Amino acid sequence: MGSSITVRTDGGASTDALEKRVVVNPESGSGDHLDSVYRLANERGYTVCETDRAGHAVDLAHEAAAEGVDVLGACGGDGTLKEVIEGLVAAEALDDVRLGVLPAGTANIVATDLGIEEIEHGFAMLDEGAVRALDLGVADGEPFVKSCVAGLTADASAATTSDVKERFGPLAFVITGVQQAATFDPLDVAIEAVADGETWSWSGEALCVLVGNSRRFTNRIGQANVEDGLFDVTVIEEMPQSDRVTEAIAQQLLGRDTEHVDRLFARRLQIVGCDRSIDFSLDGEISTHDELDLQVRPGALSMAVGPEYDPSPNE
């Protein structure tokens, strides 16, 4: 791929670049995790590769797969993990690599869902923990782990600043979404979903279309079953301006059901913008499409998990 690899050793256990490697984003979260990563990596025999630009983790993961690495840690936030998975998908190496998350970001949603508590725990589980076959979402060929969202929530993701993330952590996106709800211009969309041979269609104006792989969006935001081969889809319909903030708070903060929410499960999904292109947020990364085709790749990820991991904690 032509990208450089930064390898640092501070003594301790030797590393074997053909066996175990960590791709680390030094800018994730508070940015104070690098020394710990190198210390733990050296103790456990990992080579450390640092990213130095957006998208670099894709290249580094692709190189790791091409060089025969079979245990790979993604150290950073959810965006770093997404890039590492993109690299493994591009290398057609998902079946060959045991993947683990070493949480160093702001929210660390995926790590929390997988029962990974912090970086040292992530290393331990990557070496010694259970491995589960997790579903992977794919949107027009681009992989995602958590979710693909369109509408208000995607706009909130794009508008949430690093300062707000630092101050409020996981609540940052909810806070920004509530602030934007009163002025958001709804989407005119047509949706077709398929599950178990049955087709569900919907068209109209929506505030959000929320497609969860490891995320669910009804009631309190939480973990979806990431081993069931299905997307957890939520459509939040347009509503009177006066109700938007109230319902956003009720749905996302208080966990109440509201009349403007439709929920379904799907293996495949198509979302079409009827009046304009739509901004989609794939695990926090924004891309624009006139239409988007999504499908689940069941059990595509071999992920290390912690002892507290439960594939369906809310069922």
Image (cartoon, rainbow, N blue to C red):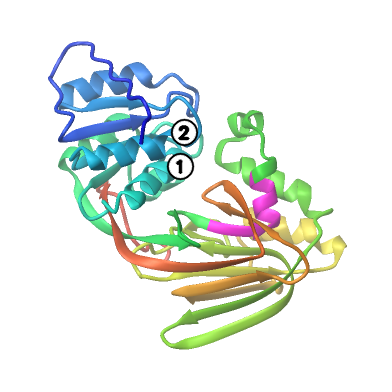
Indicate the amino acid at tag 1: Asp
Residue at the (21%, 37%) spot, across then down: 67
The answer, for residue 106, to whether it is visible in the render is yes
- Can you see residue 101? no
Distance from disc 1 to disc 2, alpha carbons, whole Å, reads: 7 Å
Residue 94 at x, y = what percent?
Answer: 27, 53
Q: Which mark is residue 268?
A: none
| Residue drawn at the location 32% of the way across and 41% of the way down | 62
- In the rendered structure, are the residues bearing label 1 and label 2 in contact, judged by CB atoms less than 8 Å apart? yes
Q: Amino acid at mark 2?
A: Gly
Residue for badge 1: 78
- Horizontal relation, residue 282 to residue 309: left or right: right
Residue closest to the eye, 29 or 309: 29
Q: Quadrant of residue 242?
A: bottom right
Quadrant including the N terminus: top left
Relative vertical location of residue 136 with respect to residue 22 in this rendering, above or below? below
Q: Residues within 10 Å of mark 1 (few under 14, many from 20)?
A: many
Q: Main secondary structure of the magenta part?
A: helix
- Where does the magenta region start and end? 148-157
- Residue of label 2: 105
- Residue at image point 12% right, 20% down: 14
If you read the primary sequence from the N terminus, does the residue marked by circle 1 or circle 2 appear first? 1
Q: Residue furthest bottom?
A: 198
Residue at 43% across, 64% down: 314
Q: Secondary structure at mark 2?
A: loop
306 and 180: which is toward the camera: 180
Horizontal side, residue 53 vs residue 1: left or right: right
Q: Quadrant of residue 134?
A: bottom left
Density class for disc 2 (Cα within 10 Å; few <14, some 14-19, many ≥20) is: many
Label 1 element class:
helix
Residue 74 position, x and y percent, is 34, 37
On whether residue 259 falls in the magenta region, the answer is no
